[in-house]
Image (cartoon, rainbow, N blue to C red):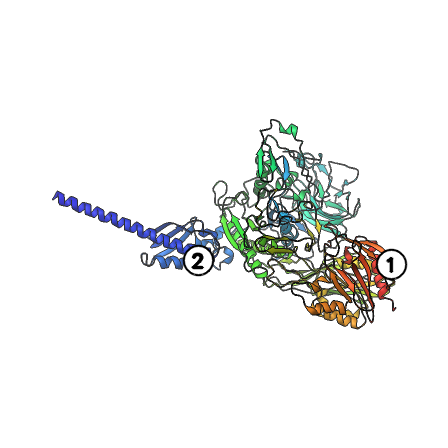
């Protein structure tokens, strides 16, 4: 009996073991099937690799099957549709064993449906992820001269934003270096700035936001500090007291007592701050004035500083006097004390003037508040933080492929004098700006000065917390008290592809902070950062695919531990837009049109995120207007007309009103006036040049400005000239790809056209071999570029050339109006109403973007324009046309049109001889039967510079037929550079742009000759 019992027990145990093994095997089989299915699904959205099931658990009490998977699945975006697809796939696989069970699929303990951002939900809003920030009673800075309110934009919001790395001091190499290599004519330390500064920040500000940056935002290399503590006999600080008197506060303030600053030295602790009590009666107002001695005429950022004290005012009233008049601001001094607070950028004349200053009064809506005054800063300046290796091992570069470490230096500070970067401050990393801006060294120097590389990338996240400390979003920490809504790091990534495929856009967030917490100080879940990353990445990729590249790669959404996304205690995204190392990406990435679109996408993503977090509606600011034109109605009245542009990517971006900005002669633009329709009549006085630009307006803010048109009524006019601005091109440089061997950018053929200016160009590419490997940042291989322009701001298309042409026309005694070429093409402007027409074509030419799959833009003479010009000339008109590609664009495009060649020869009376006709930038006027053009030597901009766009590749054009003659030649080779034709009509054409002539006097003389030629019957 015992024996039988033992056998029975053995058999039972065996059955249990076999059954368990079968169950385990069955379970593993299910897990593998689910893993395979989810891997297929996930990789259809993004290349995430292998999705693995971590556990498969059935809860019998709730009849629910829990499927936990690894982080790979969490790297895709989630929407209702793909969540359903995932659950259907799991249900199909588990139906036999777990029929009727509910399903929950989790990543990092989060149900995947919970990873759908609130913005994309219609119900089940996750309030724990709504980082709602109550609107401040008064935001940090308010431009009270702005003629319109923003109601459904980013008004009263505060955004922290930074543009990648920057120049830093490498203690190991004992030199200042970039944090990345120079490739494809830029470097990552500068490249994101070409989005952030000219596009993204203005878009956010146009929507009403206060934008804070941990790097210098002004590219002006001059800097003037005006302060109560320092006197230089050039700039002036002065006070005027009324019923309340200015006093010195207790504690410290700013003083610029040193040319350079060493580790730990804080200029905001070296001086004093002034204080006064506020009044509500304007007749009792006291004031402080900061009057700078501007070293060079130009565009300067204006920063103010003050001290936040108990009972600080919320409406300190600053007025900036500048070339365009005056602009008023209120600054909430209950936050932001002890650092530089940006007001705006303004034009100032050289020297010291009572019309160029900043004024602070003690007038307020509240009696008895304290208003403090400290230094005011004009311009960006040069780096002034001096560094040396400290006690670090010195590493010496021995060659492009190797590094050698020397023995430790015992006292390197004695061997290496502290040195600054000798670069403009805007090129430097955040670590140096933050020291100059008064941040504690615990923010900008976590390694206590031993490793600037580490200090720089760490400083940005800690700076965010320093800004927000003491505000409603971080009430239990010390800081500047600014209630941030979000922060974002803008980077480009590394990596290459061998087949010219796109690497694309990666989003990064960090749910667990440095202490492992998943909740922000205000109690909101840090998963809000994933919502932010998803929304912005979605917007960026969708807009790029729609406008430029349907094949653009959407990479993953990483939840990984990066300092820039882990440290901030507000929702934060780290954006890796594209690979600066990948040629296919950079064929788009160097184009201003791409940069504008991407920046607008980021702005829209932020707007949508913030509106959802705060349960408010949003409206996207409109696109810039076009078809802008002007015409005289009578001697003293001008009509302006324009058209709104529909945004096919955003239904809310509809123009409702407009803002008209006016400039008189060489002054700056005023603060604008709101216009309710797309047409307005304005008064002008004879003898003054008036210039106008338009922005479109809606409840979400204002658009970027239109091109600038200018008009002038001569007191004793000879005739009236119509200036047609046909130069609206924006583009990256010419590029080529030769199989898998050579590729790159060809600046000598066509350097492209920046929007306003280019701030990320380091030099021309010199390494075109695709197989050239990266060795180190000094020898980065394929795409390697020179460094001779990395401290320069390169002028681009200012859209302001009617003024330059108009000044020359004015000097000749003629009146003028101006128009965009689109208004001529549309028929809104009739050339036949004008005796003389000046057509500006600049560097207009047919231009592709990226992989050249879309049709080119910016043709010099579109068919409709050819028709208008043809009719105008046949009616006896007089046409001046100048541009660098007026011949080559019509005769040597990718797909030539025979009638284009006939147009320039039969109508304009010149033929194309060659492109790249000159590299010297010199033109000589020569003798010809057209006697109005006297001999002279002219010089145009042919190299990158900060004053004018340059002409790297002008056309040689030759006369065609009787009555057409060469009137000027390129000095270096005597090729024909310009022609004049006289017949039943007259034309004058130049193969270089008139506005690029360096001398205003030369432009005036040449224009006078042209107009005399046109105005004479012979």
> Callout 1: few (<14), some (14-19), or many (20+) C-alpha neighbours within 10 Å?
some
Q: Position of residue 590 (x, y in %)?
A: 63, 53
Q: Position of residue 620 (x, y in %)?
A: 60, 59
Q: Is residue 308 above or below residue 347?
A: above
Q: Which residue is mark 2?
A: 83
> Callout 2: few (<14), some (14-19), or many (20+) C-alpha neighbours within 10 Å?
some
Q: Which residue is mark 1?
A: 934
Disc 2 secondary structure class: helix
Disc 1 secondary structure class: loop
Left or right: residue 988 versus residue 4 is: right
How far separated are the C-alphas under marks 1 and 2?
A: 76 Å
Q: Position of residue 775 (x, y in %)?
A: 57, 42
Residue 149 can be seen in this image: yes
Q: Nearer the viewer, residue 154 or 935?
A: 935
Q: Position of residue 220 (x, y in %)?
A: 71, 46
Q: Is residue 906 above or below residue 198?
A: below
Give the mark nearer the N terminus: 1 vs 2: 2
Q: Nearer the viewer, residue 6 or 301?
A: 6
Marks 1 & 2, CB-CB < 8 Å contact: no
Quadrant of image for the N terminus: top left
Occupied quadrant, residue 181: top right
Q: Is residue 85 above or below residue 68?
A: below
């Amino acid at each position: 009996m015992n024996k039988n019992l033992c056998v029975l027990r053995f058999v039972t145990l065996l059955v249990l073991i076999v059954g368990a093994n079968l169950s385990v095997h069955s379970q593993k089989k299910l897990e593998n099937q689910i893993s395979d299915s989810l891997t297929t699904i996930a990789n259809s959205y993004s290349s995430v690799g292998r999705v693995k099931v971590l556990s498969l658990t059935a809860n019998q009490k709730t009849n629910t099957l829990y499927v936990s998977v690894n982080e790979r699945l969490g790297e895709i975006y989630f929407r209702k549709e793909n969540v359903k697809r995932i659950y259907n796939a799991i249900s199909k696989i588990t139906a036999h064993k777990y029929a009727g069970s509910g399903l929950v699929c989790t990543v990092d303990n989060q149900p995947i449906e919970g990873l759908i951002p609130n913005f994309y939900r219609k119900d089940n809003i996750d309030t724990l992820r709504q980082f709602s920030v109550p609107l401040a009673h008064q935001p940090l800075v308010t431009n009270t001269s702005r003629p319109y309110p923003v109601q459904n934009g980013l008004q009263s919001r505060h955004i922290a934003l930074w543009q990648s790395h920057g120049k830093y001091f490498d203690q190991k190499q004992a030199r200042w270096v970039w944090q990345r290599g120079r490739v494809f004519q830029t470097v990552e330390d500068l490249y994101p700035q070409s989005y952030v500064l000219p596009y993204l920040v203005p878009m956010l500000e146009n929507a009403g936001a206060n934008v804070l940056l941990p790097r210098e935002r002004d590219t002006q290399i001059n800097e003037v500090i005006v302060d109560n503590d320092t006197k230089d006999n050039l700039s002036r600080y002065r006070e005027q007291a009324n019923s309340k008197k200015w006093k010195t506060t207790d504690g410290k303030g700013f003083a610029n007592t040193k040319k350079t600053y060493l580790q730990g030295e804080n200029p905001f602790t070296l001086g004093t701050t002034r204080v006064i009590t506020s009044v509500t009666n304007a007749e009792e107002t006291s004031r402080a004035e900061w009057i700078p001695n501007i070293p060079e005429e130009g565009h300067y950022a204006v920063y103010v500083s003050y001290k936040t004290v108990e009972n600080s005012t919320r409406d300190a009233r600053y007025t900036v006097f500048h070339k365009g008049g005056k602009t008023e601001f209120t600054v909430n001094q209950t936050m932001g004390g002890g650092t530089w607070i940006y007001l705006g950028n303004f034009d100032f004349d050289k020297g010291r003037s009572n019309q160029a200053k900043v004024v602070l009064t003690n007038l307020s809506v509240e009696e008895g508040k304290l208003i403090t005054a400290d230094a005011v800063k004009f311009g960006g300046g040069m780096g002034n933080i001096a560094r040396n290796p400290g006690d670090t091992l010195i590493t010496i570069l021995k060659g492009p492929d190797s590094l050698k470490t020397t023995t430790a230096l015992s006292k390197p500070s004695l061997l290496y004098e502290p040195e600054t970067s000798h670069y403009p401050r805007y090129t430097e990393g955040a670590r140096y700006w933050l020291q100059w801006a008064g941040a504690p060294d615990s923010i900008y120097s976590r390694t206590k000065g031993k490793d600037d590389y580490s200090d720089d990338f760490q400083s940005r996240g800690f700076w965010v917390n320093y800004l927000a400390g003491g505000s409603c979003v971080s009430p239990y920490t010390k800081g500047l008290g600014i209630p941030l809504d979000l922060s974002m790091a803008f980077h480009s990534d590394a990596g290459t592809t061998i087949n010219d495929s796109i690497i694309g856009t990666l989003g990064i967030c960090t749910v667990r902070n440095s202490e492992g917490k998943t909740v922000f100080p205000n109690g909101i879940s840090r998963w809000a950062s994933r919502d932010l990353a998803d929304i912005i990445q979605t917007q960026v990729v969708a807009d790029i695919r729609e406008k430029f590249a349907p094949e653009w790669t959407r990479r993953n959404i990483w939840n990984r531990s990066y300092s820039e996304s882990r440290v901030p205690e507000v929702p934060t995204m780290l954006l890796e837009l594209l690979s600066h190392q990948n040629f296919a990406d950079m064929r788009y990435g160097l184009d201003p049109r791409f940069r504008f679109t991407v920046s607008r996408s980021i702005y829209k993503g932020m707007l949508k995120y913030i509106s959802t977090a705060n349960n408010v509606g949003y409206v996207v600011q409109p696109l810039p207007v076009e078809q802008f034109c002007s015409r005289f109605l009578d001697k003293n009245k001008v009509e302006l007309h324009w058209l709104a542009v529909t945004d096919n990517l955003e239904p809310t971006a509809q123009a409702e009103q407009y803002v008209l900005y006016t400039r008189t002669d060489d002054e700056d633009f005023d603060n604008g006036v709101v216009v309710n329709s797309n047409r307005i009549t304005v008064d002008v006085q004879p003898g003054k040049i008036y210039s106008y630009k338009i922005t479109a307006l809606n409840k979400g803010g204002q658009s970027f400005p239109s091109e600038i048109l200018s008009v002038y009524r001569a007191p004793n006019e000879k005739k009236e000239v119509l200036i047609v601005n046909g130069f609206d091109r924006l583009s990256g440089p010419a590029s080529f790809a030769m199989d898998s061997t050579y590729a790159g950018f060809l600046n000598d053929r066509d350097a492209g056209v920046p929007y306003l200016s280019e701030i990320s160009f380091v030099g021309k590419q010199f390494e075109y071999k695709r197989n050239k490997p990266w060795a180190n940042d000094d020898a980065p291989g394929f795409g390697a570029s020179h460094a001779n322009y990395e401290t320069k701001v390169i002028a681009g298309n200012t859209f302001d050339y009617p003024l330059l042409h108009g000044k020359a026309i004015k000097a000749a005694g003629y009146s003028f109006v101006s128009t965009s070429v689109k208004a001529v093409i549309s028929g809104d402007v009739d050339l036949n109403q004008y005796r003389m027409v000046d057509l500006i074509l600049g560097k207009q030419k047919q231009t592709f973007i990226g992989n050249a799959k879309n049709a080119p833009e910016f043709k010099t003479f579109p068919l409709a324009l050819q028709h208008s010009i043809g009719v105008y000339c046949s009616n006896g008109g007089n046409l001046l046309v100048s541009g660098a590609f007026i011949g080559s664009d019509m005769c040597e495009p990718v797909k030539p049109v025979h009638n284009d060649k006939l147009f320039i020869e039969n109508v304009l009376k010149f033929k194309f001889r060659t492109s790249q006709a000159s590299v010297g930038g010199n033109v000589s006027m020569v003798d010809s039967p057209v006697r109005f053009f006297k001999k002279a030597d002219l010089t145009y901009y042919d190299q990158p510079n900060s004053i004018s766009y340059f002409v790297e590749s002008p056309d040689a054009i030759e006369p065609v037929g009787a009555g057409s003659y060469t009137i000027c030649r390129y000095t270096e080779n005597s090729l024909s550079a310009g022609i004049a034709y006289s017949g039943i009509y007259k034309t004058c054409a130049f193969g270089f742009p008139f506005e690029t002539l360096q001398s205003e006097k030369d432009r005036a003389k040449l224009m006078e000759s042209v107009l005399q030629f046109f105005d004479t019957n012979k």
